[in-house]
Image: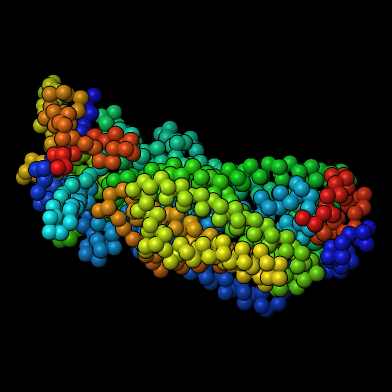
Amino acid sequence: MAQWGMAVDLDRCTGCGACVTACHAENNISTVGDDQAARGRAKHWIRVERYWEGEYPDVRLKFRPVMCQQCNNAPCEPVCPTYASHHTEDGLNAQVYNRCIGTRYCANACPYNARFFDFFNPSWDKPLQLQLNPDVSLREVGVMEKCTFCVQRIKGATIQAKAESRPVRDGEIQPACAQSCPAQALVFGDLQDPESAVSRLTRSPRGEVLLEDLGTRPNVTYLERAQS
Amino acid sequence: MATASNVTHSHPSPERMSADLLRPLLQTSWRFYLLVALLGSIVAAGAVAWVTQMFFGFGISGIRWPIYWGFYVTNFVFWIGISHAGTLISAILRLVNAGWRRPVTRCAEVITAFALMIGAMFPIIHLGRPWLAFWLFPYSSERLIWPNFRSPLVWDFFAINTYLTGSMLFLLLPMIPDFAVVRDKTTGLRHRIYRTLALGWRGTPKQWHRLESAMSIMAVAIIPVAVSVHTIVSFDFSMAPVPMWQSTIFGPYFVAGAIFSGIAGLIIAMAVLRKVLRLQEYLLPLHFENLGKLLLVMALLWGYFVFNERLVTYYGNEPSEMTVFWQTQRDNYAPLYWTMVICNFVLPLIILGIRKFRTITGCVIASIGVVIGMWLERYLIIVPSLGHKYLPYSFGSYRPQPAEITITVATFAAMCLLYVLFAKVVPIISIWEMKAGDHPSPSLIPPATEHHKLGELHL
């Protein structure tokens, strides 16, 4: 069974935001409008965090794309009273929208704030409602949603490979964010396969996981050259 | 026998006692209807707010990313805390057989029952999809999906249900003899209703003995339940890896805070009852004095817990915790924080620590401060921490919206309304316990109290 993971090369990330847009388009993430976005209701399964480092005038701008870290020891999972948030065999934190009753406990427990609540039934700024993805279910008001590593693409490619009686090839599955990244900063693949691109990057000495000391054991690794 | 007891303990004659304590049941003035209409309309406004929130979506509340818990969970913890007024205090006073408890116990136990009902509403009100709340119940479905027993929210479900059941029994048991008293004083439909409620009470020694046994069992059983309930409520926070939540002190800290706010709520309720129902001869300055001292002790205990929590955090100097720490200590939440400290610690210490100020008015002022302070405490545990979790990019702030404020106000009105209605149908001071305390006779006094003259101690 594969263990899906991602490597994010921060030295490559330009902060362009293509991943955010692609994610919205792929995963039918509803747009909430200016007012609601200002009130903290925007849902970005992946976001590009901007940080400034150093003192003026010696300032450096840093970007960090943050999505659900698909933790192996996820704080969101045990707190859910209905098993809406649970772990799959291939290492994903699955969110079962139909099972979610909206306690929002998972989002509070998530140290990365990677979970988003549906404050309203979904709607889109026109004409975005014309490009909905038929492979992704819509979420009704009152449930939590978050990055799935584009589970519909994972499933699609796995089924295709099974039909052709072959293993899934490395690089065959690309989540929308990785596919759209012009700098190829996001690399997705199977961590169980030691030869996959993501495994090799994860083993890189530049690698680190976000908030490692919390012990969440994420499947997302950030690559960054050591600070001078 | 009455002469043997302290002057402050001498109550009116048994006949006058029955007349005084049954008066609210038998006579109803226009003021009652006005009050019920007023409180009822506020509760109705709260219901409308909730329906509006379900209809339009949770977005009409102030909850936002990343502060997903706000007023509703604050109210939940607050009301579950208030519920510790009654059953726990009354159970402890019963166990140590404090004689002065007699006029106080029922006022306290009623607070427990109603505050728990109101508190237990909030986990449902705050759900994104409240119509699916029954998925928390452990019922066997054809899909074989059970609730997740690792989730503190499921523990809450069991703890609160146990406490609600226990405290209802604890409230209802000693009401049986009083229902019999009302039954004997009324006629018509009312007589038939109270006859049913009195469950065939005849006042035989055997019945008294069984009542007393049942009360002893419940008084012992309810204390660990009460302690566990608020510990489990504290686990909702301390089990999550959120800065300033993950704390080993939260269990006892929450229990102490709950009893603290509970006593304050009880003092306020007693003062209002005393004034409105003209119970000056029953709820004496002595009771306020004693409860005031208890409140003072709890204020000191609360101060100790807060000092402990803050000092350990400060000394540990963990960056994410220090962010929340300074938010409450000197940044955005500092005004609320220091208001809380004044209301919960400084004010009670001054008013209740100085004998001259420890009057009924003084106790009520201190109690109002404590109720406000304890509500703020819960708010300050929840909101600053959620707004300042680890990644600075995702910091946020929270502003309650009309829906949440209306529902919050409505719960206070609901508490008053339930209390008013209860005092209209049940004697708010236990008649038989008062009589038993003042005029012990073999037929009235069950064996347990006859032997324990601790009841004469003024604690």
Q: Quadrant of the C terminus of chain B?
A: bottom right
Percent across and percent down for residue B36 are 61, 72
**B322 or A80: which is nearer to us?**
B322
- State the image quarter where residue B197 is shown: bottom right
Foreground residue among B178 and B444: B444
A212 relative to B114, above or below: above
Q: What is the total number of numbered labels drawn onto the structure image?
A: 0
Give me the residue at 14% from left, 42% from top.
A228
Res. A64 visible in picture: yes
Of all residues shown, which one is farthest toward the bottom? B30
Q: Is residue A21 left or right of residue B399?
A: left
Locate the N terminus of chain B by quadrant: bottom right
Q: Quadrant of residue B369?
A: bottom right
What residue is shown at x 54% (from left), y 42% (from top)? B158
Q: Choose between B351 and B425: the one closer to the eye.
A: B351
Q: Residue at x 16, y 31 (%)?
A: A205
Q: Where does the image place residue B40, in percent across and percent down from the top left?
A: 56, 70
Query: In the displayed image of the protein, which residue is found farthest to the top?
Result: A165
Q: Nearer the viewer, residue B156 or A108?
A: A108
- Taking the spot 77% from the left edge, 67% from the top edge, the residue there is B284
Q: Where's residue A27, x and y in %? A: 19, 46
- Residue A59: x %, y % from top left: 14, 55
Image position of B31 with respect to B211: above or below: below
Query: Dividing the picture into quarters, in which one does residue B355 lie?
Result: bottom right
Q: Using the rendered image of the protein, determine whether residue B172 is visible from the camera's viewpoint.
A: no
